[in-house]
Amino acid sequence: MTQKIQQFLRDHGISEVEAIIPDMAGVARGKIVPAEKYAEEEGMRMPESIFLQTVTGDYPDDDSSINPSEIDIVLKADPSTIRVVPWAAEPTAQVIHDCFYSDGRPVPMAPRYLLRRIIEMYAAKGWKAVVAPELEFFLVDPNLDPDYPLKPPVGRSGRPEIGRQSYSIAAVNEFDPMFDDMYAFCEAQNIDIDTLIHEDGAAQMEINLLHGDPLSLADQAFLFKRTAREAALRHKMYATFMAKPMAKEPGSAMHIHQSVVDTTTGENVFSNKDGSPTQLFFSHIAGLQKYLPAAMSLFAPNVNSYRRLSRYTMAPINVQWGYDNRTAGLRVPVSSPSNRRVENRLGGADANPYLAITASMACGYLGMIEGLKPTEPINGSAYELPFALPRTLAEALKLLRECKPLVDIFGDRYVAAYAAVKETEHETFLQVISSWEREHLLLNV
C-alpha cells in the first residue's frame, strides 16, 4: 500500500475503506474493508467473472470468453483516486482500483484498463486527449412498484413539475436542499462541477464537469452518478440516469466534448497557428462519423437506451456534424482556436463513462491515423435526414463484432465478453411482457 493512501487514512481518521472497481455497466463493485486491514494488504482479490455479471445479476451461459476455472484477479489501488465518502455514518474512504492477473498482466475486460490503453495510443502519437462530459439525469418520486410509471418529485413548493421548465432557475431552486447536499458531497470528493442547469424534461437536470484528463473525468463521472443518487435519497427522491425513464419526456444524455493537444507544445492540434481548423480536426470528425455507428453499443448499452434516440426529441439520429448545431450527432461549439473541440452527442446517461470516453476517443483516433475526410457540415436540421444509427441493442452489437479496427483497439476478448453480457441482458428483456402488449394485443389480435 502506498504511503499516500496510508497517510490519507491517518489524516482523516478513516475506519473503513470501500475498495471499488467499475464493471462493464459502470456499477461500483468491490469490498468494504476495515481501514487497518486494508492498509496491510498488498492487493485484494476478486473473481474475474465480476466483469461478466449482467445488470440483472445473471451471467452469460457461454463461458468461452473467460477461464471456466473462475480465476481470481488482483485489485491494486490507484492512489490518485482516494476520497472520503461524505455521506457515510462512519469515517469512510473510497479508492478506485485497477485489475491485474497474478503475473502482473492487466485484465483486458476492465473498463478502466481500456481507457488507459487508448490514452497510451494517443501518447504514442504525441497527442493527449482532453474531454469534458455533460451528464443529464431526472429526479423522480420513489418508485416501489416497477409496473407504475415514474413521475416528477414534489419540490419545496409542495407541487411537482407538470410542464417543462428548460433552463428555469426557479425550477432548480425547487430542489435546493438536495442540490446543496450534492454540491457538498462533490466538493468533498474533488468532483469538479462546472455548471448545473435545468434541462428540457420535467425535473431533468444537467451537470457539466470541467474539462481535463480522460481518466480523471471518467472517474469523476463514475463517482458523480453514485453521489447524485445518495444526495437524492436523503431527500426522499431518486436520481436516475436511465436514458429514457419517462415515455413523454426527453431522454438523458452524456455528451462528451473532446479535443487533442500536442504533448510537447501543449497546443490544440485542431487549430493552425492562424486560428483555422487543421486537417487533424476534420479527420477526427470523420473518424467519429465512420466508426460511431459500430461503437453504438458502448454509448447506448441497454435496451432502454434506444428509446432515447428518436427524431425531434433532442437526441441525434445520425452522425451528421455542424457548427453549433444541436440537431447533429456531432456539434462543433463556438470557441476560440485554442478551445476548438467536437461535442459527441450520441451517448446516453446510462453509458459507462469509461467505455463511452474510450470509444469516442478511439473513433476520433482512427479518423486521424487513417486521414479520413468528413462530410460537409450540415446547416439545417439533421432530424430531417435518415436514421444512420442502430435502432436496437442487437443491431449495435452485431456492428461492433464486425468492425475490425474497433475490435483491434478494444481486444477480441473484451468484445466477446461485452457482447455476451449485453446479449444475455437482451434475451432476459425479451422474456418480459409489457403493459403495451396486454393493452393492445390481448383482445385485438
Image: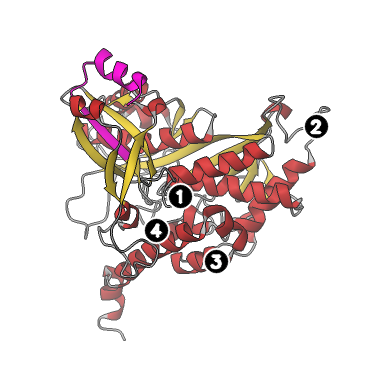
Q: Residue at x 25, y 80 (%)?
A: 442
The residue to which callout 3 is attached is 399
The residue to which callout 4 is attached is 302
The segment highlighted magenta reads: 1-20
Q: Residues within 10 Å of mark 4 (few under 14, many from 20)?
A: many
Q: Position of residue 4 (x, y in %)?
A: 36, 19
Give SS at disc 2: loop
Distance Cα–Cα, label 2 vs label 4:
40 Å
Give SS at disc 3: helix
Give SS at disc 1: loop
Residue 423 position (above or below residue 365): below
Given the image, on which type of amino acid does mark 2 rest?
Asn
Q: Earlier in the sequence, mark 1 or mark 4?
A: 4
The residue to which callout 2 is attached is 272
Q: Are marks 1 and 2 in contact (CB under 8 Å)?
A: no
Given the image, on which type of amino acid does mark 4 rest?
Asn
Q: Which residue appears farthest toward the right when viewing the image? A: 274
Q: Are marks 1 and 4 in contact (CB under 8 Å)?
A: yes
Give SS at disc 4: loop
Q: Position of residue 340 (x, y in %)?
A: 69, 33
Q: Residues within 10 Å of mark 3 (few under 14, many from 20)?
A: some
